[in-house]
Image: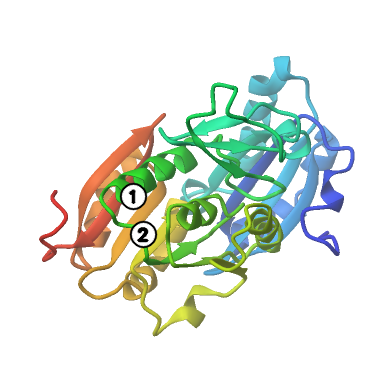
Amino acid sequence: METEEPGKGVKQGVRGLVVEIRGSASAADALERNRKWEEKGWVLLNVVRLDYGQTCLRFNIDSPMSRWDQVLGEFSAAVDEVVRGEELDALDWQVVPCDLHEGLNGREPITLGSSWYAAFEEGAGTGQDAFGARRKIILDAGWAFGSGYHPSTRSCVIGMEWLADENGLSGKRVLDIGTGTGILAVLAGKMGASEVAAVDRDPDAVYTATKNVRKNRLERTVTVSQTPVEALAGTQWDIILANLAISVFCCMSEKIVSLLCRDEGILLLGGYRQLQSGRVVRILSGYGLEAIWDTSVDGWEAGVFVNMRRQDMAV
C-alpha cells in the first residue's frame, strides 16, 4: 500500500476524515485483516511498521462534517469489536480532517506559541498583517504528524519557547525523536541550535520533514533520517525533543534517557494527557530526572525534565 514516493499517492480522492491508529503489531494485524471497513466504505490508506512492535494504520472516512461525531462513534465501536483488553487501552488515535493534508496551501497561517507562526505557502504572513511581529516557519504537513494544529504539538512549541528564553537552545545539539513533519526540528534550528538530528521510522514523515527543512533553508543545521533510536546508542545530546504517543514513550524511555548528556541534558517530552502525567513523572524519576517546567494545551501535556542534581535551572 505504500507509494513509491511517500506522502504522495494516498492523497488522491481522499475526503472527510483521516483516522490514524498506532498500536501493537498484533492489534494492527487484526485491524488490517478486518473486512468491516470495506462494508462501511472506510478505506485503509496505508500501513507503516514502526519500532518496538508498533504499527501505524491510516483510514479514510468519507463523511460530511455534520456526521463526523456519529461516524467516529461507529468506527470506534468497530475497533472495539476487533481489539480487546490491554491492547485496546494501548491504542493511540489521531483524527484529522483531510483538508489539513490536502488543502493546507492557501489556508491562513496559524500561530505557534507566543512568538512564531506556521505558513502553508511561501508568501503567507507578511509584515503588514497580524503575524508581522512573529517569526515564520514554512510548513507542508503532508501525511505526517505535526501540522501545528494538534494540542500536543502546540504544547511542545511553548516548551521550546521557554527553553529559548532560558538560553537553553542556542548553540546546542538537539535530537528530535519522532519528528513527524519536522516542525519541532525546524523551530530548533530557527531558535539557534547548532545541530539538529530529526529521526522518524515512518517514511512519510522523513519525506515530509526533509521537504520542510529545505523550505526553511536549514539543510546545514537539520538532518532528517529513518535512523532507529538503537542506532544512536553512544551519542550524547544537549536537548532531546520527544513528542510521542505514551505507549511508544514507555517502550523507549530508557533508550531516550541514555542519549542525554549525563549531567546537563534536557528532555522536552510531549504527547501525553494530563491523566498520564503522574506515570510519566514516575518513569523519568526512576532515571534521575525531574520536571522543572510543564504546560497543558487542551488537556495535552508537555514537560521539561533535567537531572535532579542540576542547579542552574530552577524548578
- Looking at the rendering, in which quadrant would you find the N terminus? bottom right
Identify which residue is drawn at 47% across, 47% down: 89
Instruction: Tell me the crowding category of disc 2: few under 14, some 14 to 19, or many 20 or more residues within 10 angstroms, Cα based.
Output: some
Residue 175 x %, y %: 45, 66
Residue 195 x %, y %: 47, 69
Three-letter amino acid code of the residue under disc 1: Ala
Q: CA distance from mark 1 to mark 2?
A: 7 Å
Identify which residue is drawn at 38% across, 48% down: 160
Locate residue 262: give its quadrant: bottom left
Instruction: Work out which residue is located at the far right of the displayed protein and give it.
Output: 13
- Residue 25 vs residue 6: left or right? left
Residue 251 x %, y %: 42, 65
- Residue 54 vs residue 47: left or right? left
> Looking at the image, how many numbered discs can be counted on the residues?
2
User: Dot 2: what SS?
Assistant: loop
Locate residue 42: give its quadrant: top right
Residue 188 x %, y %: 46, 55
Answer whether residue 80 is visible to the viewer in this image.
Answer: no
Image: 198 above or below 181: below
Answer whether residue 151 is visible to the viewer in this image.
Answer: yes
Image: 310 above or below 104: below
Looking at the rendered structure, which numbered label has been put on residue 170?
A: 2
Q: Nearer the viewer, residue 314 or 38?
A: 314
Q: Nearer the viewer, residue 272 or 147?
A: 147
User: Dot 1: what SS?
Assistant: helix
Mark 1–mark 2 contact, CB under 8 Å?
Answer: yes
Locate residue 198: give its quadrant: bottom right
Identify which residue is drawn at 26% across, 60% down: 283
Q: Nearer the viewer, residue 28 or 245?
A: 245
Answer with mark 1 or mark 2, whichever residue precedes in sequence: 1
Looking at the rendered structure, which numbered label has been put on residue 164?
A: 1
